[in-house]
Image (tube, rainbow, N blue to C red):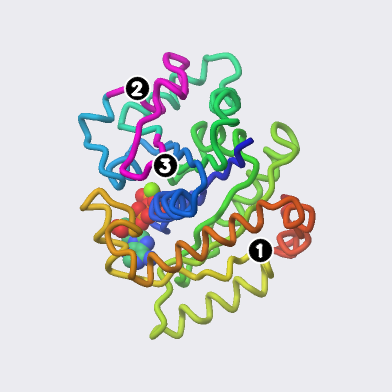
Amino acid sequence: MAKTICIANQKGGVGKTTTSVNLSSALATLGKRVLLIDMDPQGNASSGLGIKRYDTQDANSYHVLIGEKTLTEATHNTSLEKLKICTANPDLVGAEIELVDMPHREYRLKQAVSIVADQYDFVIIDCPPSLGLITLNALNAADSFLVPLQCEYYALEGLSQLLNTAGLIKKSLNPSLHIEGIVLTMFDVRNNLSHQVVTQIKEHFGDKVFNAIIPRNVRLSEAPSHGQSILEYDSKSIGSVRYLELAHEVIARSLPKATEANPVENTNAYKGEVNV
Ligand code: ATP
Ligand code: MG
């Protein structure tokens, strides 16, 4: 039965898609069966894995959400044998509006994922930078959510809003939803601010913060234009090594013992506002 992890942060450009693509690829490289679902109309995860724009006209996440296609019909192969992708294209913007009048509008992705869950070890969902119906569907379909945080001054901005939203979803729609962890991205070793952000986030969130910190790495930013994950584009780069480390941690946290020990207290310590 797959573990479904939603990669979410309504702040734009913090590394959601880079993390979705490279974590998925790293998990697949480690032998896990992975389905990456692109839920962002920008379709960056799709193009980042070499799916060309015209290919995303095929069955994609838009068709799944509005119920025109099953997730199986909208799933495509990638260059990695164990990694499949459900693509996205700009049509997905329309789903936000079309869903409003549809029954079970916030459960549609959950229903679709549940049908294929036994075929995968991990389902990773790349969310758009918003907290609309698409992200609501993703958080509702997920067992947990993983938050990429950029190592910059405003890193925490908006995070309490995301945690509050997740808390509300947990209370009303998806009682088992929990935070998988926080991954710090675009860390710059020469920048004092980066170090301060790491210290601050670790104080707030304790061991919810993954040990693997993703550095700012030019190879990571180049890889998508080659339609490859970092593991294929430059497997020896620090970005590749770190995403593999992150994948190992995600696998370790998914083992039954690690899940039981999931310490929610550290999350609550943040302004005392959340209960995720
Ligand atoms: P959006 O909110 O628009 O969906 P996002 O949160 O998915 O954005 P990404 O697209 O992953 O963010 O990253 C934003 C930009 O930063 C991209 O150009 C990406 O290539 C680059 N980037 C991401 N992580 C790194 C990194 N560790 N080092 C260097 N560049 C990075
Ligand atoms: Mg993105």
For label 3, the SS is: strand
Dot 3 alpha-carbon crowd within 10 angstroms: few under 14, some 14 to 19, many 20 or more = many
Chief SS of the magenta region? loop
Is 88 or 259 nearer to us in this picture? 259
Residue 130: x percent and y percent?
A: 47, 43
Residue 83's label in the rendered image is 3
Dot 1 alpha-carbon crowd within 10 angstroms: few under 14, some 14 to 19, many 20 or more = many
Kindly identify the residue that appears in the image at 28 percent across and 66 percent down.
219
Q: CA distance from mark 3 to mark 2?
A: 17 Å
Image quadrant of residue 190?
bottom left
Mark 3 vs 2, N-terminal side? 2
For label 1, the SS is: helix
Mark 3 sits near ligand 1, with its Cβ under 8 Å away: no
Asked if the residue under mark 2 is in contact with the one under mark 3, i.e. CB atoms within 8 Å, the reply is no
Quadrant field for ligand 1: bottom left
Name the residue carrying label 1: 208
Asked if the residue under mark 2 is in contact with the one under mark 1, i.e. CB atoms within 8 Å, the reply is no
Q: CA distance from mark 1 to mark 3?
A: 26 Å
